[in-house]
Image (cartoon, rainbow, N blue to C red):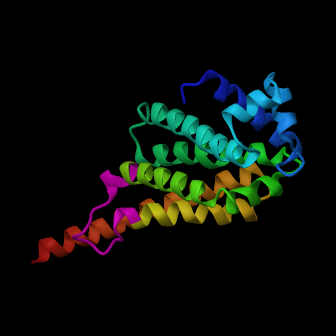
């Protein structure tokens, strides 16, 4: 996003949404936080739903940049997966724990911003496919296709966030899921290699 005013609005919206939730925030609140007039805000975004969706895309885009920069420094697949989920899942979870109206914001991502959320999730899953590619030995073994493994990983995390009470608990569950996944991929690869050797 190139427009400096748009970024200022999205940063302001993030601040007020985290402080008050979505429903209680008005366009005037966002304009005041951004330091612009309400008419000027309406020239940039038609309503707060569009601001929320644009902010969702902007924030996750920033997270994706951080992940890609960090992955370049991490050669190990397990470390890369843990880092990706730390930035994508654990840090936002930590932020939401400190937000009084977190449920209101989560409801938005499942409501009017659902399509936006699905597109964003697909981008993250594509990144997981890239990370998993070196250890996904398919189609010659019994392991699932790498795209399905990535989808299972990403989808499982949604349930983890709902059941965890602390950041440490979530981080531990994510790490455990990653270890189980990599062990299963390694086992399937070993079986596949053994089966090919026997023929």
Q: Position of residue 68 (x, y in %)?
A: 46, 36
Q: Position of residue 158 (x, y in %)?
A: 64, 62
Residue stretch rendered in magenta on the structure = 131-147
Is residue 60 in view?
Answer: yes
Residue 40 placement, left or right of 120 = right
Residue 28 magenta-highlighted = no
Asked if residue 134 lies in the magenta stretch, the reply is yes
Query: Quadrant of the rendered structure where residue 41 is?
Result: top right
Relative to residue 152, is residue 92 depicted above or below? Answer: above
Res. 10 in view: no
Left/right of residue 53 with respect to residue 22 in the rendered view: left
Name the residue: 41% across, 52% down: 126
Quadrant of image for the C terminus:
bottom left
Looking at the image, which is closer to me, 192 or 49? 49
Residue drawn at (72%, 49%) of the image: 49
Left or right placement of residue 56 versus residue 121 in this view: right
Where, quadrant-wise, is the N terminus in this rendering?
Answer: top right
Q: Where does the image place residue 125, in percent across and percent down from the top left?
A: 46, 55
Classify 48 as above or below 34: below
Query: Residue 63 is drawn in which quadrant?
Result: top right
Q: Residue at x 82, y 25 (%)?
A: 37
- Residue at position x 68%, y 46% in the image: 50
Where residue 172 appears, x then y in whole percent? Answer: 65, 54
């Amino acid at each position: 996003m190139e427009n400096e005013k748009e970024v200022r609005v999205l940063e302001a919206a993030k601040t007020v949404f985290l402080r008050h939730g979505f429903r209680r925030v008005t366009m005037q609140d966002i304009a005041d936080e951004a330091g612009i007039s309400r008419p000027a805000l309406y020239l940039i975004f038609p309503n707060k739903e569009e601001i929320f969706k644009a902010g969702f895309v902007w924030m996750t885009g920033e997270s994706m940049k951080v992940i890609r920069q960090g992955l370049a420094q991490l050669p190990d697949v397990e470390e890369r997966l843990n880092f990706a989920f730390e930035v994508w899942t654990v840090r936002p979870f930590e932020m939401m724990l400190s937000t009084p109206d977190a449920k209101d914001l989560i409801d938005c991502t499942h409501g009017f911003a659902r399509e936006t959320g699905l597109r964003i999730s697909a981008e993250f899953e594509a990144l997981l496919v890239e990370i998993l590619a070196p250890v996904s030995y398919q189609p010659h073994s019994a392991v699932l296709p790498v795209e399905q493994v990535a989808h299972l990983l990403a989808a499982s995390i949604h349930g983890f966030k709902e059941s965890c009470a602390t950041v440490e608990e979530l981080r531990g569950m994510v790490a455990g899921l990653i270890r189980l996944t990599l062990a299963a991929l390694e086992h399937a690869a070993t079986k596949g290699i053994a089966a090919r050797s026997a023929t």
